[in-house]
Structure formats: structure tokens, C-alpha cells
Image: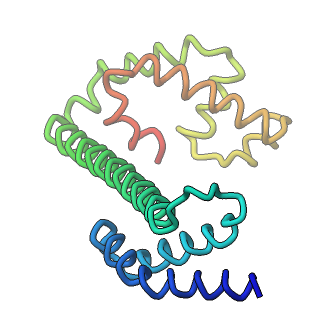
Amino acid sequence: MERYSDIQAFNQLFNEYYSRFVRFAEGYVKEIPVAEDFASEAFTNYWENRERLSMETNPPAYILTIIKNKCLNHLQHQQIRQRVTEELRNHSEWALQTKISTLEACNPDFLFSEEIERIISTALNKLPVKTRQIFILNRFQGFSYKEVAEKMNLSLKAIEFHISKALSQLRLSLKDFLVILFFILIS
């Protein structure tokens, strides 16, 4: 008989406050389904924990506190998502502006100038002989990694290592021209 009265009291509590609590949550989260979920979850939480609560616990206040916390978490999560979206947009704008600036500053005559060729030649000459040979075969003579591996009697991993090593050295030597030369050397 006592269990029936618990259910009856809970149903009365639910019927009296559910729609109010949904409106409360919806006022903050602006999404009725989310507000309904929060209210339902709060009532469920109350029902599952009712026997552990002290006698002084005010059920509507307890349930509303749960809803308030769910709304706060939801809004804080939205705030973080907006911040990340804004940062990504700012990064995209920065990347786009960098591309525009790079293209505006691009001087094709300079790219093929003797100075650039000298810098590349100096950087390549600083490489170990085998690394330089592999890089020249791949990048300047157009051999694939597989073809270079067969020609040099090395594994594909060794070829990848030497190419990576050469590109790393070239990046250091050409750091001032890297953005522009990236497209030339990689293609």
C-alpha cells in the first residue's frame, strides 16, 4: 500500500511540475526535445534516489536543481563548441590570408633565379651522397620510390627515409621560401 502511495505522490508531483520544468529548461536551451529530456531525466533521477534523500528534501527544488545543472552543462558545452568553431574559422581565415599574401608576393622570375638554384644546390651538396642520389633520382629525374629502391638496391622504407631526410634539410635551407617552393618541390 505504501508503494502505491509513493507512485501516486510521484505521479502528482510529475503532473504538477513537468510542464513547468520543461518550460524552464526550454527558456535556456531553446530546444523543446532537449528540455523534455532534461526534465524526464531529472524526474527519473529523483525517483531512483528518493529513498536515499533526507526527509527535509524538497522534491520540486531537488528536481529543478538537476534540470538547472543539466542546462548549465548544455550551455557550457555549446559555449566551448562555439569557441572552437570561432578558432577554426579564425585559423581558416589566417590560412586563406597567408595564401593570398604568398601569391601576391610570389615573383616567378625570382623562383627560377640563380639565387634559389644556388640555395637548393648548396643544400643538396650538404646531404650525404646516397641521400642526394636518391632525392635527385626521385624529384629531378622522376623515378618512383619503387624504381629508386630497385635501382639503388634498397627497401622502400629506406627510400622514404632518405627522401624525408632530404626534404627536411631543404626545408631548413629554404625556410624563407618554403611556402612558395612547397608546390614546386612536392609536385
Number of numbered tags placed on the structure image: 0
Residue 136, located in which quarter of the rendered image?
top right
Camera-side residue: 74 or 101? 74
Colour scheme in use: rainbow
Residue at 35 percent of width and 79 percent of height: 20
Camera-side residue: 79 or 115? 79
Residue 150, located in which quarter of the rendered image?
top right
Quadrant location of the N terminus in the rendered image: bottom right
Residue 35 x/y as whole percent: 41, 75
Residue 62 x/y as whole percent: 50, 61
Q: Is residue 13 above or below residue 112?
A: below
Residue at 26 percent of width and 45 percent of height: 90
**In this rendering, position of residue 63 left or right of residue 146:** left
Residue 57 x/y as whole percent: 55, 58
Residue 21, located in which quarter of the rendered image?
bottom left
Residue 164 x/y as whole percent: 63, 31
Residue at 56 percent of width and 87 percent of height: 11
Q: Residue furthest front?
A: 1
Q: Is residue 51 above or below residue 3?
A: above
Camera-side residue: 108 or 64? 64
Residue at 45 percent of width and 56 percent of height: 69
Q: Is residue 133 above or below residue 18?
A: above
Q: Residue furthest left?
A: 104
**In this rendering, position of residue 12 left or right of residue 22:** right
Q: Is residue 165 above or below residue 57?
A: above
